[in-house]
Amino acid sequence: MSVAYLSAEAASGAETDRYARCIAASKRVRWDIDADVIRGRRFDLDHKFLPDGLSRVDELSFLSADEQRFLSRVQGRTYANMFGLVERFIGAKVLECSRDHWLGDQTALEALVRFGDEELKHQELFRRIERMMAEVMPEGYSFAWQPNEIAGVVLGKSTWAVLALTLHIELFTQSHFRESIEPDAALSPLFKDVLLYHWREEHQHAVLDELEWRRYDAGISPSVREMAVDEFIELVGAVDGILQAQAESDAGYFMRMLGRKLQPSEASAVRESLLAAYRWQYILSGARHPHFRTVLSELTTESQRARIAAALTGLA
Ligand SMILES: [Fe+2]
Ligand SMILES: [Fe+2]
């Protein structure tokens, strides 16, 4: 047996251990939508849905505290809808990646099947939450994106690009919770629990995203990777297109429901603040996540990272 063969076996064993730890974590934190998360509760209008650290509503000083709370609920509803949206393509991509393990590492296969199962449950949770938020919010809110249509576009890009986007999403989910959601005492206890339980199952997802991204990356040529970097940039641009339209829609809804007319400069500030908040929530907080930057720097060249950085510059 050659030394090279031995080291390949050792590497594969170490990877299997990482997949096995994800299975163990998945079993340990497993939760139920009704029994653990919702527990018969409903939303009320006394609380914010998103913390100021994510919503930035505290920067709009011409809004009253009540109005800021309402704007945070609009953003929280969009947050639930956005996760319902992205988890459609994440679940499908994970199941697609699992094909490579069907007749191989059964531990990796189990970890990815559990991942896919959890994302199906998360989508159901966010659909339930959307309906419960609609019950307590005035009519007229719109989130027109169709998860299957968006997933069709995203899944048309290379696996490298989709896994990069997915790792970025699943890492920012965690940093949002730890840095902004968990420490905020003014949040809706129900929505906080939704994001707490969601976060608990996202940790192992990010580990699996990275394992799969590295595995896929190891099997492609530099020219394929070069195109994949461009596709990743296109995906970030597509996300930004959704954010621009949703920020406009949410700003319009907020101002129609406000019960008073804002000055033109204040209306512009609401629109700009919403877009800046959404770009932070869904793009920049992930792109700047230290672990995302570490993995990206290990898988890309300096000029590829410069192209990605240039694409992000206009969003900050
Ligand atoms: Fe999820
Ligand atoms: Fe996830």
Image (cartoon, rainbow, N blue to C red):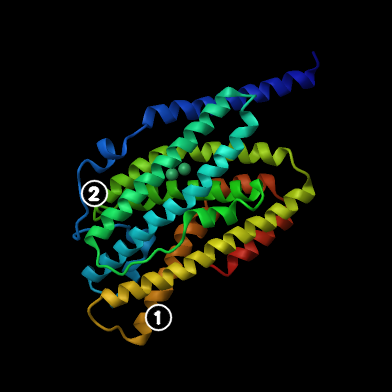
Question: Earlier along the polypeptide chain: callout 1 or callout 2?
Answer: 2
Q: Residue furthest right?
A: 2
Question: Which label number is shown at residue 304?
Answer: none
Residue at (19%, 56%) from the top-left corner? Answer: 44
Residue at (64%, 65%) from the top-left corner? Answer: 310
Question: Which label number is shown at residue 189?
Answer: 2
Q: Residue furthest top?
A: 1
Quarter holding residue 314 = bottom right
Q: Which residue is mark 1?
A: 268
Q: Position of residue 165 (x, y in %)?
A: 57, 51
The yes-or-no answer for disc 2 within 8 Å of ligand 1 is no
Between 60 and 261, the residue placed more toward the observer is 261
Q: Position of residue 29 (x, y in %)?
A: 37, 31
Q: Is residue 88 above or below residue 234?
A: above
Mark 1 surroundings within 10 Å by alpha-carbon count, few (fewer than 14), some (14 through 19), many (20 or more): few
Amino acid type of the residue that numbered disc 1 sits on in the rendered structure = Ser
Provide the secondary structure element on which disc 1 rests: helix
Residue at (29%, 57%) from the top-left corner? Answer: 49
Relative to 246, 94 lies left or right: right
Between 12 and 124, the residue placed more toward the observer is 124
Between 229 and 81, the residue placed more toward the observer is 81
Q: Is residue 204 visible?
A: no
The CA span between labels 1 and 2 is: 32 Å
Amino acid type of the residue that numbered disc 2 sits on in the rendered structure = Pro
